[in-house]
Image (tube, helix red, strand yellow):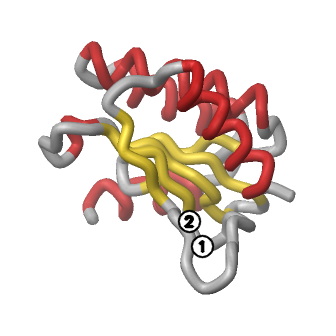
Amino acid sequence: MRERARELKAAARPHAGGANEEGAVLARIAAMPAADRAMGERLHALVRATAPDLAPKLWYGMPAYAKDGKVVCFFQGAQKFKTRYATFGFSDKAALDEGHMWPTAFALKELTAAAEARIRERLRRAVR
């Protein structure tokens, strides 16, 4: 929660956002342990290439990507909460609705070509 409070204060400062936010996201990814860092870097590149309208920002200390200031998706490294897998998730702002129930987060032990393709497809749907 303290991290989120710092993020909100930084966002309220004049000239906040843009390259500054992306720099903060890249710095956070660079500070991750090796396995999370490699996955975070690949996911960052994938999100920026697939959904260039999404703006990088920190969200509760995690790399996230927002549309019109609202977080659409995020990456949570495995070490964030000392879990055995990383998570790539979507917020309620993502347009992923499928009937009465649909997945909003995906566990990642490895970022394979198949996983990347699935994430790309979900990203395209999320930002339509």
Res. 72 image quadrant = bottom right
Which is more toward the observer, 30 or 43?
Answer: 43
Q: Is residue 111 above or below residue 103?
A: above
Q: Nearer the viewer, residue 85 or 114?
A: 114
Residue 127, position as x, y percentages in the image: 79, 55
Kindly state the secondary structure of the residue where label 2 is placed.
loop
User: Residue at coordinates 60% horizontally, 85% vertically from top-left?
Assistant: 100
Residue 33: mark: none
> How many numbered circles are shown?
2
| Residue type indicated by callout 2 | Ser
Q: Quadrant of the N terminus?
A: bottom left
Does residue 81 appear in the picture of this structure? yes
Task: Give the residue at mark 1.
Answer: 92
Q: Residue drawn at (36%, 45%), measured in percent from left and top?
A: 107
The percent position of residue 6, horizontal first and vertical second, equals 38, 55
| Residue in the picture at 60% in, 73% down | 92
Q: Amino acid at mark 1?
A: Asp
The reply, left or right, for residue 20 in relation to residue 87 is right
Q: Image check: 73 left or right of 67?
A: left
Q: Regarding mark 1 in the picture, which secondary structure is present there? A: loop
Q: Is residue 126 left or right of residue 6?
A: right
Q: Does the residue at mark 1 contact the one at mark 2 (Cβ under 8 Å)?
A: yes
Q: Residue 9 location in percent, x, y?
A: 47, 60
Kindly identify the residue that appears in the image at 67 percent across and 45 percent down: 17
Q: Give percent across and percent down for residue 121.
A: 73, 42
Which quarter of the rendering shows the C terminus? bottom right
Residue 12 found in image quarter = bottom right
* Residue holding disc 2: 91
Question: Outermost residue toward the bottom?
Answer: 100
The image quarter in which residue 56 lies: top right
Question: Would you say 21 lies left or right of 67 here?
Answer: left
